[in-house]
Image (cartoon, rainbow, N blue to C red):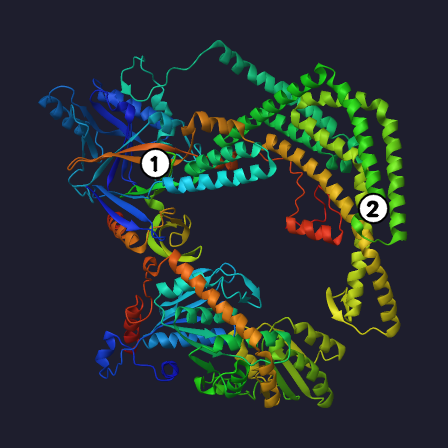
Amino acid sequence: MALKAFFPTCCASVDSGLLVGRWVPEQSSAVVLAVLQFPFIPIQVKHLLAQVRQASRVGVAVLGTWCHHRQEPEEGLGHFLEGLAAVFSHEPWLQLGRERGSTFWSCKAIWRPMSPGASGQDQVMLIFYDQRQVLLSQLHPPAALPDRQAGDAPASAGGLAAVFDTVARSEALFRSDRFHEGPVRLSHWQSEGVEASILVELAKQAAGPTCLLFSFLLSLLSAVGACRLFRLWPLPSICSKLSTCKQVQHRLEHLSLIFSTRKAENPAQLMRKANVCVSVLLDVALGLALLTWLHGKGHIGQLADALVPVADRVAEELQHLLQWLMGAPAGLKMNRALDQVLGRFFLYHIHLWISYIHLMSPFVERILWHVGLSACLGLTVALSLLSDITALLTFHIYCFYVYGARLYSLKTRGLSSLWRLFRGKKWNVLRQRVDSCSYDLDQLFIGTLLFTILVFLLPTTALYYLVFTLLRLLVVTVQGLLHLFVDLVNSLPLYSLCLRLCRPYRLAAGVKFRVLGHEAGKPLRLLMQINPLPYSHVVRTYRLPSCGCRPGLSWSSLCRKLFLGELVYPWRQKGDRQD
Amino acid sequence: MEDEQSFSDICGGRLALQRRYYSPSCREFCLSCPRLSLRSLTAVTCTVWLVAYGLFTLCENSMILSAAIFITLVGLLGYLHFVKIDQETLLIIDSLGIQMTSYYASGKESTTFIEMGKVKDIVINEAIYMQKVIYYLCILLKDPVEPHRISQVVPVFQSAKPRLDCLIEVYKSCQEILAHQKATSASP
Amino acid sequence: MASRGRQEDSLPPSPESPHTISEGSSTCSTMTHNICMVSDFFYPNMGGVESHIYQLSQCLIKRGHKVIIVTHAYENRKGIRYLTNGLKVYYLPLKVMYNQSIATTLFHSLPLLRYIFVRERVTIIHSHSSFSAMAHDALFHAKTMGLQTVFTDHSLFGFADVSSVLTNKLLTVSLCDTNHVICVSYTSKENTVLRAALNPEIVSVIPNAVDPTDFTPDPSKRSDSGTTVIVVSRLVYRKGTDLLSGIIPELCHKYPDLHFIIGGEGPKRIILEEVRERYQLHDRVRLLGALEHKEVRNVLVQGHIVYDHVAMEAVLPIDKRLDRLISHCGPVAGSIFALLVVLNFLFLTFLRWMTPDSIIDVAVDASGPNGAWTHEYSCSKRKGEE
């Protein structure tokens, strides 16, 4: 297997020295982490390496020598470097060298002659990597890393994950910066220096108590929510139907997640926290914008003035529609008597509705004002409230739909069972199947009579059902769009997306290589770059769970239900199967 | 070392296969399709605009014309950025892995790298594609739990779709490297 | 052509391969064919046609021919698979319409079938079963492309109801330019000749055989309390389940010591269950449900009478049958089908213009004289002989 030497690009131009890094025998690859500069005292180097090894649990060792010929090659240096192999024994001993004015490097791996399996003329590959990017990036999907506490053995993750892991774990090595005057001088990637501004420090100091305070408040709130009073019969069922309640609960969960005093255990949890935080902030910001607009120039009054006429108008249109249906709609000839009965029934209903609206009209402005206040909890809450208000204001349409559907389903069921009677079959309840059965004459006669009546009355009912179902579907669609938007705000991982946009190497899907060139007799040089995660994957991986008030019906089952006249609800029914 | 050969794809179009041997353990195959031809671009644009003009004469609304221009531009951008692949590269490095890169006409490139430890084999397979039965080169990935099973099949040169003679060239080269890899990884 | 098709099935040439030279008598007329079996019915679907196709293909491969099978996709079994001895099976992604057979449009399967015929260098198309729409399509296309065709009919069919009228019409059209037809029994030959209005000379009979000694009743396993009748078949209309359900109560009434054991599964099982409940025959009629292939023998040897459903045979006077056939084969249908043939040819010309034969890759042979599997197979056979 060819030997691979991973070399950080930032060390390419430093002076000669020793290579410090980790040897991964399974991959036969050497991960160079830093270059140790002359002069040094071997004991101190060994001491430092032992310290790092203990802190990071990575087998850091001296791997070989690095020889950068700036001037004419000195004979003495070469001998000196060879002599170092005796001091720091390592298997194999790498000798990296860079000639002046040449882009190709020389690399030799020296195995001790007596060691088994030492194939002298191994191929060597030099792979350059950007230490900073590899250190900060996070591989997706995360390799199964053993816990830092439990596993003191080096990561068993295969292949390149091992390289990433090595670099990430030996952070302790990089802690010393350029101006540090220690006994040993290391050169490696160095951060620009920690931004120790006062604001950041203050925020860090304040974060703990704030979190405590807020989590206490939240626990108080949840204690109030859990009290016996809210467990009384109608409240839970109503709450589960109202999207506002659900949204508020959802947001409360988010807040408690943000302010929880526990530290995030892994990067995924940290990312989730950040995403939730950004989503809540954005939501509240949008909500406040809405609030200022609403309360700015008397928009509430205008809205309230517009709302009642709109409701009136809708009721009026419905009346017209009913009158049209009671005549000869689209030239169809309906059963006159049934048509009149149904039409009058629905007209009376609309009449009731109009009077209810007029009773309400003085209070509309007050109600809207309070609803507008809810926007400070976030835009999503306001939108959920809007969806609930829509549902309340179109209650009459819902009622019509239910009546129509009930009548229609009665007819379809009757027709289907009578059709079975025609064919000499019946539904066997015990065995859950259709059996053949012989009916006598009277039964057949009555069955035929009923069948005929039902068949002739079906078009009238079906027409009413169709019209009201379409109306109902319109309302449900509007509500669905609102919910879709709310879900979008709830579940979009904005922080991860921004990270992907500004720091693409932070979320890595893997690596990619570029061949830098090859010359006969010299090692192949490759450049390892971070392959950023595609946006679609970012969204899929970091999507926050939405509150899940989806209808959960497939299109085919929806159509089947509509055709058979079963009731369709926008929320999930208890009896619904999950398929 | 570099050489170039000309092949044809399954629809009879011309493909150029470039082979670069960087070192005995590192080879690159690069299949490039012909660029977007001016003729087809003009044809599509003219059709859209003629249709739009026909609609415009019917309903006298100038929105249609601006919409047509907009649609053509957006469609062209989308086509260049998401659909049209100019070049596909297969880079195989002994003991490191296989890397597939596709370069879109707009300059976007998407890369997939598969580590050698996950690769089980490279084979030529047959598949039914649209109304054709074609050969394609694919990489078989090992199941991480059971090393003898195949967990996934990754097709190579998905957009170029070269014919069998071209695939055999690439296949033989890849097999040389894989054989070397197996020989060296088994011996120590 | 008729004689060649015949020869291929009855007197095939000895296999042409270098390994047979050692056996001395290389009488080889080196005529090997590239045969394409087309049918809607193949494994994983189970039945007589399926096993017939499989066994026939294996025998032809042993003779040194190249054989491929084309069928439609079964659920997620689609694409190209290899079976024993390099038998290559194409599972084409065509929509299944009714009863495991694809929709017959005579056009939509042409591009794929043509591609396969060209890339496999097929010389003979062998279609199976008159219920298979794909088989008819393949015959139709093969004739447009100018290939030799053979058809094997596996079943008997009536003349009375709508479906049989339609199928017979289709059969008439697709068989009128088929080079050779094979039937599985003499009754079947008679039936096919009548249905398709064929010249009886191009129809030959190769009987399907069941080794009856395997199923001889075993006296030690039977119950002595009476006669036991065993029925093993798929419980569908075609196998006469309706007749069976009609006759069970009468027989049981007449012979009080008669027992039935019925194995198999199918849509008509419910009829048998109803009969059993209505006449209170729970102790005398046993329904076993679906049986594994290896269980069948153990069931069959328990009986006294083995009732082997081949099919129900529509017994009609011959002059009536002819009359009906003639009345259905009018000039209208003839001209319609002629038009279809012309359209098919135009479509083929269009396809040839779109993808000329020259740019279709030639497939690597799996079976046949220089197939990839032939060498391996003959090696293993020789090892077995030693």
Q: How many marks?
A: 2
Q: Residue at x 78, y 24 (%)?
A: A306
> Are labels 2 and 1 on one chain?
yes
At 37% from the left edge and 16% from the top edge, which residue is drawn?
Answer: A192
SS at mark 1 in the image: strand
| Picture coordinates of residue C283, whole percent (x, y) | 70, 80
Query: Please, what is the three-letter code of the amino acid marked with disc 2?
Result: Leu
Q: Residue at x 17, y 29 (%)?
A: A86
Chain where mark 1 sits: A
- Relative to the observer, which residue lies in front, C127 or B40? B40
Q: What distance separates the C-alpha of mark 2 from that of mark 1?
A: 68 Å
Q: Which mark is residue C51?
A: none
Q: Which of the 4 quarters of the picture holds residue B77?
A: top left
Mark 2 and mark 1 lie on one chain; the one further toward the N terminus is 2
The quadrant of the picture occupied by the N terminus of chain B is top left
- Residue indicated by mark 1: A512
Q: How crowded is the residue under tag 1: few (<14 C-alpha within 10 Å), some, or many (20+)?
A: many
The residue at 27%/81% (across/down) is C29
Question: Circle 2 — which element?
Answer: helix
Q: Quadrant location of residue B57?
A: top right
In this rendering, does residue C107 appear at all?
yes
- Label 1 amino acid? Lys
Q: Circle 2 marks a residue in which chain?
A: A
Q: Is residue C318 above or below residue C102?
A: below
A507 sits left or right of A94 in the view: right
- Quadrant for residue C194, please give it: bottom right
**Picture coordinates of residue A370, whole percent (x, y):** 76, 21
Location of mark 2 (residue):
A325
Q: Is residue A556 left or right of residue B62?
A: right
